[in-house]
Amino acid sequence: MAHDKIKAAARRRMATTGESYSAARREVIRQFRDAASSDPSGEPQWFAISYQDMGPVSTWADTLLGGGPAGGRIEVGAGELRLRMADFKVDVPRASVRRAARSAHQARGTIGVHAKGSRWLANGSADGLVEIEVDPPCHTERSLSTLFRRMKVTRLIVSLVDPDGFIAALGGDEAYPPAGSRTE
């Protein structure tokens, strides 16, 4: 909450309760924090990326870059999805997610972060793949994985430990038709 909003709310409270400014300000801040902590959409849900098929050397390198089993995740917040896998980072506005469903993509032994045009595969396993269609497209952050360029993203395929929980967190199968179906 911005200082000017706190100040205005504290002054309104002073006028109605007769409290001192500092007491009113403390109460306004406490009420604001209580409201924020009771809001279930305030904290993003975390879904771990599956590293089941990744070897120990690759897992070590991924962990060194901030990913690995402890850091690789998708955060589902009220306003956006945040994918983090090693140094690869992409933030997708929730309004841009057109479809999310289990993917039939064949990873063919490939693990890590790979792109083909604006389609991205971020996996540590060939199991638990979820395909996320993004429209309008978003862009990655500059990193070693993207050769320090901002790259366009229209589709993400990610391996997750709990793919069905992730799809349910986005609103369930009804909101997002299965991959491969046409929604035009």
Image (cartoon, rainbow, N blue to C red):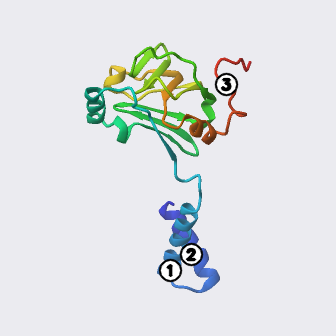
Helix or strand or loop: what does disc 2 sit on?
helix
Image coords of residue 127 (percent x, y): 49, 26
Q: Are marks 1 and 2 in contact (CB under 8 Å)?
A: yes
Give the secondary structure at mark 1. Answer: helix
Q: Are marks 3 and 2 in contact (CB under 8 Å)?
A: no
Report crowding for label 3: few under 14, some 14 to 19, many 20 or more residues within 10 A (C-alpha): some
Q: Which residue is mark 2?
A: 11
Q: Nearer the viewer, mark 3 or mark 1?
A: 3
Q: Is residue 61 left or right of residue 15?
A: left
**Residue at 56% from the left image edge and 75% from the top image edge:** 11
Q: Which mark is residue 21?
A: 1
Closer to us: 21 or 134: 134
From the image, tell me which residue sits under label 3.
178
In space, the residues marked 1 and 2 are separated at their CA atoms by: 7 Å
Q: Earlier in the sequence, mark 3 or mark 2?
A: 2
Q: Say above or below: 180 vs 92.
A: above
* Residue 10 horizontal/vertical position (percent): 55, 74
Q: Amino acid at mark 3?
A: Pro
> Can you tell which of label 3 and label 2 is closer to the viewer?
3
Say which of 25 and 135 sits in front: 135
Going by the numbered disc 2, the residue's amino acid type is Arg
Comparing 166 with 99, the one in front is 166
Give coordinates of residue 182: x percent, y percent.
71, 17
Q: Classify mark 3: helix, strand or loop.
A: loop
